Amino acid sequence: MLVFTLLGIVTYGQSSYLKHIKATVANEKIFISWTTKAGFTCQDIFIELGKDSLKFKKVGAIYGWCGDTTEKDYGFVIDSPFYNQLNFVRIKLGDIGYSEIVQLRVISVRNKVAVIPHPANANTELFFNNPFHKQTTITFYNSNGQIIHTLETSKSSILLGEYLTNSSLYLYILEQEGEPPIVGKLVYQ
């Protein structure tokens, strides 16, 4: 089973207790880092994750006193985020309060191709496994088998709204050198 994870997503948040909070996606995990402001202290830090900005669950903790008279840096890895959807992350700073909520998407392509969101629209991306940035040809067909568009890329995703415009069922063939072609279909609305 091939697995592909979108790398390099970074989101930032602010808090009255923190100098910064940052989340990055790498290898199907979320790395979150933050810096407490000079002079801020609390007891125990809890890392929380949710599928929305209202309901969170604790996914980690750093016990003991946090902060100091100087700025202090912290980091934590969330090993099991929610795949192919938004993740909402926040830090609970003891009984003092919460950081801002940081949101980011962790993309995992387990079946070689993922269309997110689907049914597709102008903002939908087609993600595919291309870790070595091979030249990839993608051909879109209408339901009558006529070629609608052919493109070449070395990236690992494309924005469908740049190539598809009419609401319809589309077939696609994704071809990379040395790999069997991937045939799929999608609904564009």
Image (tube, rainbow, N blue to C red):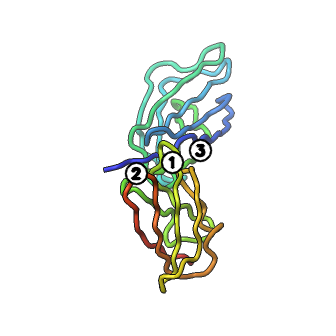
Mark 2 is on which residue type? Gly
Residue found 59% across the figure and 44% down from its top: 101
Residue 178: which disc? 2
Mark 1 is on which residue type? Lys
137 shown above or below 56: below
Which residue corresponds to mark 1?
134
Residue 169: which disc? none
Residue found 52% across the figure and 53% down from its top: 86
Which residue corresponds to mark 3?
101
Under tag 2, what secondary structure? loop
Indicate which label's residue lies in the foreground, 3 or 2.
2
Under tag 3, what secondary structure? loop
Residue found 48% across the figure and 86% down from its top: 144
Seen from the viewer's position, the closer of residues 2 and 82 is 2
Q: Which x, y percent locates residue 10?
A: 60, 40
The disc, 1 or 2, on the residue closer to the chain's N-terminal end is 1
Seen from the viewer's position, the closer of residues 27 and 75 is 27
The disc, 1 or 3, on the residue closer to the chain's N-terminal end is 3
Indicate which label's residue lies in the foreground, 1 or 3.
1
